Image (cartoon, rainbow, N blue to C red):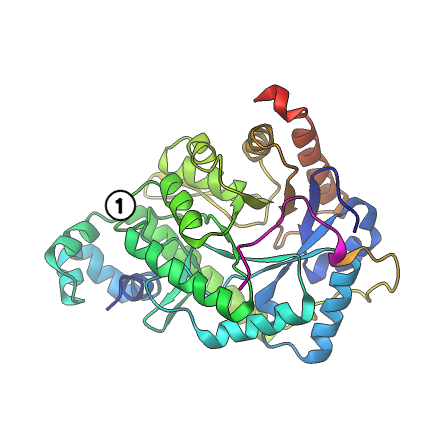
Amino acid sequence: MSIEAFLARLYVDSELRARFLADPAGEARRAGFDDATAEKLASIDRTGLEMAAASFERKRDAKRRERTAPHPPFGHPLPASGARGNDVNLPHVRGGATT
Amino acid sequence: MRKLERSAFGLGWRPELAAAIFANLDAIDVVEVIADDWLDARSSELRALRLLSSTLPVLLHATSLGLASTELVSERRLEKLARVIDAVRPVAWSEHLAFVRGGGVEIGHLAAPPRTRATIDGLAANVARARAITGSAPILENVATLIEPPLSEMPEAEFVRTAIEACETSLLLDLHNLHANATNFGWNPVDLLDAVDDIEIGYVHLAGGRRIHAAGETRILDDHLHATPDPVFTLLGQLAQRREEPLTIVLERDGHYPQFHELLGELQRGRTYVDRSLPRAALR
């Protein structure tokens, strides 16, 4: 299991989170992590974990509500004139090298 | 082409703000569009977005790729994004130094990854894949977090710098995320400004949040529902003082919308802090 897979489950699964907080190193070992990683996970920021999990849950709830009540991406007809558009050089906006 | 001599200021494009944005084009230099809203858009909808990008410079902001991960980014998601980029032709596109899923489980939002070499290697591979499919690399944004990322081996400042260098791209510096993390975990936000002093800044985010409480602790949640707080403007001024080049600055607001003149007031306040730093060379 990747570390991201474990953390994703930890953030969304309240039962796993409860088991983990009761025995963090043991739960990490049961997920397949070695002793060193399990010990590091045992020192997790517990308050932050609960705060983050609650915040992620609110975000998922909000997304579910958005899906059931879609709104148009434009709230107003687009103007046909006065264009300045993407031929304007913004100061220093540049991504990485193109292919 | 018209070259903007001064720093550029703009807003996150939201349907609720669209009418007001069009009514105030003289005060807005750029809009940032959330790419994820358009990944499944019909061709006609993308043509409408193209009309927007021919009216006003557009930055395309992705939130769901989950590039900062040891797991491989989805080719299908990148192909959808490439379709939007091809249709809209934004000035640039951006993503976050975050993961959003793991092992098929969707977190539902941006999660700060473990600050490790393995994450940076995974990120670099994912950015290379994104570059190959979309034609350009994303500008990468530092993210806010309520939890100190587990298994981290380096401070955030070192992680951000190393990540940007590994991906050969530029930084979308979110100053509220910086303020929130520095406050939440007790470090000086100037440490990160120092660390990225010679890193290219793609553009800058301003936003607000609120304080939340649990287990006797208080942390800042980056919710984009509140006005930009004073320390973020202070950081903007400090950033501008360090930079020779003008900046592009985008204010993010995702709800609890105030009267539009209040958002314009935030942009104007940002301009004041940036202009205050002129002439930059004399202040270095």
Image point (39%, 58%), residue name:
B124
**Residue B232 shown left or right of residue B73 in the figure:** right
Label 1, on which residue? B153
**Residue B92 shown left or right of residue B155 in the figure:** right
Q: Main secondary structure of the magenta part?
A: loop
**Residue A75 shown left or right of residue B144 in the figure:** right
Q: Specify the farthest residue to the top.
A: B282
Front residue (pair B207, B193): B193
Image point (56%, 66%), residue name:
B135
Residue A1 drawn above or below residue B13? below
- Tell me where residue B243 appears, x and y as whole percent: 58, 32
| Chain to which mark 1 belongs | B
**Per the image, is A74 magenta?**
no
Q: Quick check: can you spot residue B157?
A: yes
Mark 1: few/some/many CA within 10 Å (<14, 14-19, 20+): few
- Which amino acid does the dot numbered 1 rest on? Glu
Front residue (pair B249, B247): B247
- Tell me where residue B21 appears, x and y as whole percent: 77, 54
Region rendered in magenta: A86-99
